[in-house]
Amino acid sequence: MIDTPYVFTFGAGASSADPRSRDKTITGGKGANLAEMASIGLPVPPGLTISTEVCAHYNANGKSFDDSLRAGVTAGIRHIETATGRSFGDAANPLLVSVRSGARVSMPGMMDTVLNLGLNDQTVQGLADGSGNLRFAWDSYRRFIQMYADVVLGLEHALFEDALEQAKEDNGFHEDTQMEAAHWQDLVAVYKEIVAHELGHPFPQDVNQQLWGAIGAVFDSWESERAKVYRRLNDIPASWGTAVNVQAMVFGNMGDTSATGVAFTRDPATGEKAYYGEWLVNAQGEDVVAGIRTPQYLTKHARERAGAKPLSMEEAMPEAYTQLAHVFEVLEKHYKDMQDIEFTVERGKLWMLQTRSGKRTAKAALKIAVEMVKEGLIDEKEAILRVDPMALDQLLHPALDPKAARDDLGKGLPASPGAASGAIALDAETATAWAERGEAVVLVRVETSPEDIAGMHASRGVLTARGGMTSHAAVVARGMGRPCVSGAGALSIDNAARTLRFGDRVLKEGDIITIDGTTGDVFAGAVPTIEPELGDDFATLMGWADKHRRMKVRTNAETPEDCRMARIFGAEGIGLCRTEHMFFDATRIPYVRQMILAEDAAGRREAIVKLLPAQREDFSAIFKIMAGLPVTIRLLDPPLHEFLPHTEADFAELSDTVGIGVETLKRRANELHEFNPMLGHRGCRLAITFPEIYEMQARAIFEAACDVVEASGAPIVPEVMIPLAATKRELEILRKLIDETAAAVFAEKGRTLDYLVGTMIELPRAALMAGELAEEARFFSFGTNDLTQTTLGISRDDASRFLNAYVEQGIYPRDPFVSLDIEGVGQLVSLAAERGRKTRGDIKLGICGEHGGDPASIAFCEQTGLDYVSASPFRVPIARLAAAQAVLKK
Amino acid sequence: MIDTPYVFTFGAGASSADPRSRDKTITGGKGANLAEMASIGLPVPPGLTISTEVCAHYNANGKSFDDSLRAGVTAGIRHIETATGRSFGDAANPLLVSVRSGARVSMPGMMDTVLNLGLNDQTVQGLADGSGNLRFAWDSYRRFIQMYADVVLGLEHALFEDALEQAKEDNGFHEDTQMEAAHWQDLVAVYKEIVAHELGHPFPQDVNQQLWGAIGAVFDSWESERAKVYRRLNDIPASWGTAVNVQAMVFGNMGDTSATGVAFTRDPATGEKAYYGEWLVNAQGEDVVAGIRTPQYLTKHARERAGAKPLSMEEAMPEAYTQLAHVFEVLEKHYKDMQDIEFTVERGKLWMLQTRSGKRTAKAALKIAVEMVKEGLIDEKEAILRVDPMALDQLLHPALDPKAARDDLGKGLPASPGAASGAIALDAETATAWAERGEAVVLVRVETSPEDIAGMHASRGVLTARGGMTSHAAVVARGMGRPCVSGAGALSIDNAARTLRFGDRVLKEGDIITIDGTTGDVFAGAVPTIEPELGDDFATLMGWADKHRRMKVRTNAETPEDCRMARIFGAEGIGLCRTEHMFFDATRIPYVRQMILAEDAAGRREAIVKLLPAQREDFSAIFKIMAGLPVTIRLLDPPLHEFLPHTEADFAELSDTVGIGVETLKRRANELHEFNPMLGHRGCRLAITFPEIYEMQARAIFEAACDVVEASGAPIVPEVMIPLAATKRELEILRKLIDETAAAVFAEKGRTLDYLVGTMIELPRAALMAGELAEEARFFSFGTNDLTQTTLGISRDDASRFLNAYVEQGIYPRDPFVSLDIEGVGQLVSLAAERGRKTRGDIKLGICGEHGGDPASIAFCEQTGLDYVSASPFRVPIARLAAAQAVLKK
C-alpha cells in the first residue's frame, strides 16, 4: 500500500484498503464511486484521489502543498505508472491523466475536468508513436493546452477559439475534421505563443508542474464566487471541501475497436428493466454529448424498436457489450439502485469512468422502487425513500407532450402543476359562460380574488400577471387541481381592448394559449398534453407509505368534488374547510352583502338567517362524503370587504336587492376599505364584533351533523376551528357562543354529538401564548401561511417584487411560503406545540397551511410530533409519501 | 380585645391591636384608614371591619356565615354600644350604624352604603326622643327603608321614588322640605307596604336581621357583573374580596352646632399649602355633594379671596375648625401625603369619616411632591414616585379653559395631547397657505399620509375621521407636539363641497373648530385655552428623576425644531431619526419620484445623486444640534409607492419633471400598488433590491458627520440603523455596503470616525433570530409599533374597527399600540434582548416605538435591562420620570 492518509489509490487490483477511500465525505462522490467500483473488481482506469480534507488545509495555508501530500501524490502516480506500464513525462511511453474535482455532492461552479494532462512537446511524439496516430496526438495536445489554459491558467477561452477559427480560415476549411496532423501541430505553436504572450512565461512543459497546477486549480475553484453562492443556497458548509481525482487516460477514439458511451441500468423514462444508453464507435465522451455525431442504441432491442439502422453495441461489439452487461448486473446488485454510468472501450477493453444513481422520471422512480422490492434488492422502507414525493406531481397532472412544438410566450411562476390549453378568458364571468357551452378556457387575470373562484373552477387553468407561489390564484388553483402560472411579469392585460400582451406579442380574448404550471411556461396556441395515469406501482408504493407513516394526512377542501377527489387520493379527513368559499355563490352573495351592509345586529341577523339553509347543505354534503372522518371547519376568516361589489353593475344590482342607494353603498364599501387587510378586521375579530355570523355557522354545522348522523349513522365529530385568535379571551368568548349554539341545536334535534372547538395558530402571539390558548382549545391547526406572513413581515401577495432577489442572494434558501422557514417560523411552531401539550396533554396538533404539502416542511412536522398534516387534494399523495419518509429518516 | 381573626374593631380608644386591622389587603382601603386614624388618636366613630378573607369564604360556601364570624360581629357591635353608650335595637336609646363595602382598591360596581341601619318601628321613636326631632327621625327611617330596599333587598328604586312623588302630590307639595314628621311617618307605612307586596314578607324589624342582610349584600356585590367586568379590565383577582365596615352613625344635621364637610389638606388644583374644602352647617354628607344647598368655604382666607359672604367654618365654628386643622396636621405627618377627608361635626364634636390620598392636578402633584421634600415629610425617591408621569402631559400642552362654554360636536380618540382652535383646512396645501398668511388652522382629514406632513406642521392641530392611537396622524402629531384627535367616527368629509359633517351638524372649510387631544373632544367655534408653564417644581423633580434613573432617554426626531425641542425637554440623543420624512420636501420629492420610476440602477443613481446634498444638510443640521450626543439614523423604511403622486395635477407635474407620459406614470404607480404595504416591499428590502438608496444615505451620513466634526470638533458617532431585517444575511449584505461607503467617504475626507451599524427588531423573526443578527448588529432598537402589528397580526391603521370592542371585552387590557402587550410582544422583546446579549455582550439595546413614551412599557424596558428608551419630544419628560420610577419600584 502506498497511501498517505490524504491520498488514496484505486484500480488495477491495487486499490486502497482504507474504507475512507470509499467514503464520499473523504474522497467525494466521484472518487468514492471509482474506488468502490475498483474494489468490487470492475475495470476502472487506475488513479488516485486527494482527500477533501486537503482542500481546507490548502486554502487555509496560503494555497500551499505540504511535503507529505507531495509524497503521497508521487506515490499515487507511481501506482498508475505501474498499473499502466507507462511513465508520467516519459517521451517514449508517456502516461496521460485526467484531473477532475469531486465534492461530496455534485456542485456547479467547480472546476470540471482537465484531460490529456502529461502532454508536452516531447510526450506528444510518444503518444503519436504509441497510438500510431499523429493527428490524434497533436489534436490531443492542442485540446489539452486549450483546456488547461482555460481552467488552470485562467485565460480567455475565446483567445483559443479565435486562433482555431483563424487557422481554419487560413486553410480554407469549414470543419475541425478537415484539420490534419500538421495543422494541429501548427495550432499548438500558436496556442503556446498565446499563453506566453498572455502570461509572460511559456506553457508548462514540466508534467509535474502541469499536475500541481491542475490540483491547485481544483482547490481554488472551491472558493470561486459561483461555488460560494451555490453552497450558500444549498446550505453546503465551506468546510466540506472538494477532492481531486487523477486518473489514467483511456481513449475511445483509438479506432474501430474503441468506443465510448453513457448508459442506465434501467430505462430512466419508464423504469422498465432494460439497459438503456447510447454509444459511439471510435469517439470520445464529449462526442456523445456534443451531438456532432448521432449516438447509436446500446441494445438490439432498442434499435429495432426505434427502427434505426446503425448497429447497436450489442451487435457491433458483442464482446465488449457482454462485459458491459455484466458490469450492469454487478453495479445494480452492489448499489441496489438504478445506475447512470460512463464507459470507454479502448481497443476492445471496457473501462468504467463513472457510476452514480441515475436521475429518473417519477413514473420510472415508482416502477424501479416497486420492482426492486419484488426482486429482493431493497425492502419497502428503502423503496419509500427512493421516490421524491414532489415528483409524484408529474403523475397526477396532465403534462405537455415533450415532442410537441411550442410557441413560447413567456414565463411565470410554476404555481400549480399540470398543463392546460384553452381560450383566453379575461374575467370569471366570461370563463364560466364559455365553459358552460363546452369550451376549454384559461382564465387570465392580473390577479384573482375570491370572486373569481367560480370562474377558476370553470377553467382548465389559470394565468396571472401578479402574485407569488402562494398568491390567491396559486393557493386556490392547487386546491382545485387546476394548473396555474402566476406572476408572469411580462404579461400585461388591457381589459378595455380585451387583449393581453407578452412583450411584443398581442393576443385577443378567445385566442388559444397553453400554460405549464409545472414549469411556469406559457405558450401561444394549443400544445398537446399527455394525460396522467396512476398505475399499480403508485398504489403499491402508497400502501407501503401508509404502513410506515405516523402522521395522518388530511386535505384542505370545501367543495364536494374536492372532497371526493381527496378521498380518492387517500385523505383521512379534512384539515381545513374554508367556509368563506361558500359565501361567493351567486345565489348567496346578495345576502352576504346585505349582512355586511346592515346597520345593526338585527339587520345582520335578518340577512344571515337566509344564509343558514345553504350553509347547512354545504356541511351536510361534506359530512356525507367524509362519512365519519374528521372534518375541521374554519369559521369565516376574510375581511368583509372582500365580499363587496367592485363594478358599477354589481353596485346597481346590490342596490336593487337591498334597497339602499348606490351612493350610500359605495360610501359604506369605502368605509370598509383597509390599508392592510391581512392585519385587519378579519378572522375571529369579525365574530367578536358581529357574533351573529359565527352563531349561524355553528348552527349550520351542528344541524347538518345531527341530520347526517340521523340519516347515515356515521360517527360525525365536527371540529370547529376559530381563526386568527391571539388571546385566550377570544377563544373563551367564542367557545361560549359555539357551545351555547350546540346546546340549542341538540335540544331542538333531541340528539347530542361530540364536537371539538379549536383554533388556528397563525399569529406569533398565538404561538407564544399557546399554553393559555390550550386551556380553551382542544386542537391547534398551524396556519403557516399567515404565520409566515406575520413572523417574517411579508405579504405573500406583495412578495413577488423582492422575494426572488431574496432567494437569489441567499437570504432565504427557498420561498418561505412554499417550504417552511424552519429556523424562524419553525421556532414558533415548536414552541406552540410544546406549550400547548404542556397545558393539554391530548391536544390534537395539525398543520393546514400550504406547507402541509411540502416534503421538507412535513419532515419538520414529524420531528415536532404533529398529529396530522393537511394538504390540497392533489398534494395528498405527496404528503402521504413525505410523511412516511419523515418517519424512516428520523 | 374582642377580635376574632376576621373581625377588627376601631375607635373610642379600643381599636384592635392587630396590625392586620390597618392592612388594606385585610380590612380594605376604607377600613384600614379608619383603623389607622383611630390608632393615632383621631376622633373616628367606633366601628368594626369584617376582613376581606371572609368574602371569599362566604361566596365559596353557599353564602353562609359561620358561628365564629357571628360571634365576632356580635362582640364588635358590643364594642360600638359600649363606646357610644347606645344599644343596637334598643327602643329607648338606639344605636344606628352605617354599613359600607371597602375593597383593597376603590371599585365601582360594589355596594356603596346603607345608612341609619338599626331603625325600626320602635327605635325610630328612640331616635326622635334622643335627637328631639321627630321629623328627622321619621325622615331617617324612610331613607333607611328606601336605601336598604334598593341595595340589600334588590327592589326597584323607582317604586319608592314614585311613592314619594305621590305623597307630595297628595299633599300639594313640591319640595321634600315641605314634608313634615307626620308625612314621613305616613310614607314609611307606604314603603313598608311596597316591600311586603314585592317580597311577600315584611320589611325586617329585627335589627340583627337588618345587619346580616346588609353584610351579605356587600359580599354579594363583589360577584356582581359590573364588579366582575371592572376586575377583569383592571386585572384585580377575584380572590382579593371586599371588607365590610360597620360604624356608628354620627349626624351633622342635629342643629346649628352640627355640620358636615369634605376637605383637602392642600389645594388639589394648585398644590398650594393651604387647607381647602367645603362645609355646610346642619347638614348631612350627601347635602354637600348633591348641590341642593351651596357649600361654604372652609377657611377665612379662601372666603375672602373669593369675595363670598357666608361665614367660613374657621369663623363660624372656631372650636370645631381648630380640631379639624389639628387633624389635618396629624394626617399629613402620618400619611406623608396630601389627604382627602370627610368629616362631620355632631353637636360641636368633630368626627372623621374617611381619609385617603387626594387626587390632584399635575401641577399640584409636582408642587406637593417638591414641597414635601423641602418640608422633610418625604425624600426625593418618594417624591419621584408621587407624580404620575402621564399627568405631565397636562403641563406641556395648552389645555381648554375649564370655565369656558363649549359647543360639543363629537368625540374621537385622544391621539396627541393639548388643545387647539383654528379654521378648518381640508387639505395640507390649504393648511400651509392659510398658516403662511398668519391664520390658525386645524387640519381635518379622513386620514393623513406622509404627504400631509408639511400641512400638519403648519396647523395648530389635526383631526381625522379614521385611524387609531398610533395611526400616522397620531404618531406624527405627537412627534410634533401638535394636539390631535383621531378616528372621530361621526365625522364625514365632503371634499367636493368643502364641508364636513358631525352627525347633523355641517361645517364649512374655514369655520373655526376646537379640538382637545387630551380628551378626544371636538367643539364648534373657538374654546379659550390656557397655556402651559413649566415652573421650578418641574425642573426640580426632573433633576431628581435623572439622578435615579438607569436608562437613557432619547427622542424620535428628524427636524431641527424637534431636535431642539427634545433637547430642551432633556433628550440625551436621538433614538430614531426617520429619514423618509426628509424625502417629502417639495424641492426633493420630484427626484424621489424620478428615482422610483427609473427603469434601472443607472437611472435610479442619477436621481439619487440629486438628493445627496439635501440629505447631507439634513444630517449636518441634526449632528450640530445634538453636538456629540448619540444619533440613530434609520435608513429609508416606507414602501416606495408612498412617495408617488395621487392627484391628476401631481401626475401632470411629475410628467413634466421626469419627461415620462402621464399614462405610463400611472401604470407604473399602479404596478407599485401593494395589498398589504405594511408587509410589502419596504425597509431593508428596498436596499436589497435597490442598494443605491442606502448607499446614498450612508454617504450623506458620513459626509455630514465628517464635516461637522471638522467644523465643531464634537465627538460624532453616527448610529446607522437598518430597518425591517429578519435575517442575518440582510444585515451582512447591507453592512458591507455601509462599511464600504464609510471607507470611501473617510478616504475622500482624510478622516476616520467611529460609527455603529445596527438594526431594528420589529419582526417576530428578527426577535427569534436575534442571536444571529447580533453577529452583524452592534445595536438593536426595538420597533415595537411594527413588532406589535406583526406579533398580534393587527394593522394599527385598521384597528379602530374592532380594537375598542377588544378592550371593552377585556381581550386586551389596553390598546396594545399605546401600552406594550407585555405578555405577548414582551416575550419577544425579552427573548431578543437575551439572545442578542448572549452573542454580543456589549450590544446596545433601546426601544424607539411609541411605547418608549408609555410609563408601563418603560417599566418593562427597565426590567428587561434596555439601555435607553426613545420617545417623541413631548414625551421625553414623561419617559425621564417613568424611567426613574421603574428603577425605584424594582
Image: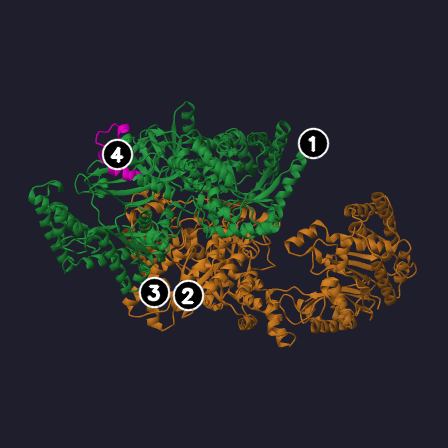
Chain colours: A green, B orange
The alpha-carbon separation of the residues under discs 1 and 3 comes to: 78 Å
- In front of the other: A204 or A169: A204
> Which residue type carries mark 4?
Glu
Residue A483 visible in this rendered orientation of the protein: no
Q: Mark 3 points at which residue?
A: B702
Earlier along the polypeptide chain: callout 2 or callout 3? 2
Q: Name the residue under label 4.
A: A314
Please determine if labels 2 and 1 lie on a single subunit. Answer: no
> Which residue type carries mark 2?
Val
Q: Which of marks 4 and 1 is in front?
A: 4
- In front of the other: B499 or A874: A874
A418 on left or right of B465: left
The alpha-carbon separation of the residues under discs 2 and 1 comes to: 71 Å
Q: Name the residue under label 1.
A: A750
Please say if the residues under marks 2 and 3 sit with CB atoms less than 8 Å apart. Answer: no
Please say if the residues under marks 2 and 1 sit with CB atoms less than 8 Å apart. Answer: no
Q: Residue B631 carries which label?
A: 2
The alpha-carbon separation of the residues under discs 4 and 3 comes to: 75 Å
Whether B582 is drawn above or below A681: the answer is: below
Earlier along the polypeptide chain: callout 4 or callout 1? 4
In the picture, which quadrant includes the N terminus of chain A?
bottom left
Task: Name the element at disc 1.
Answer: loop
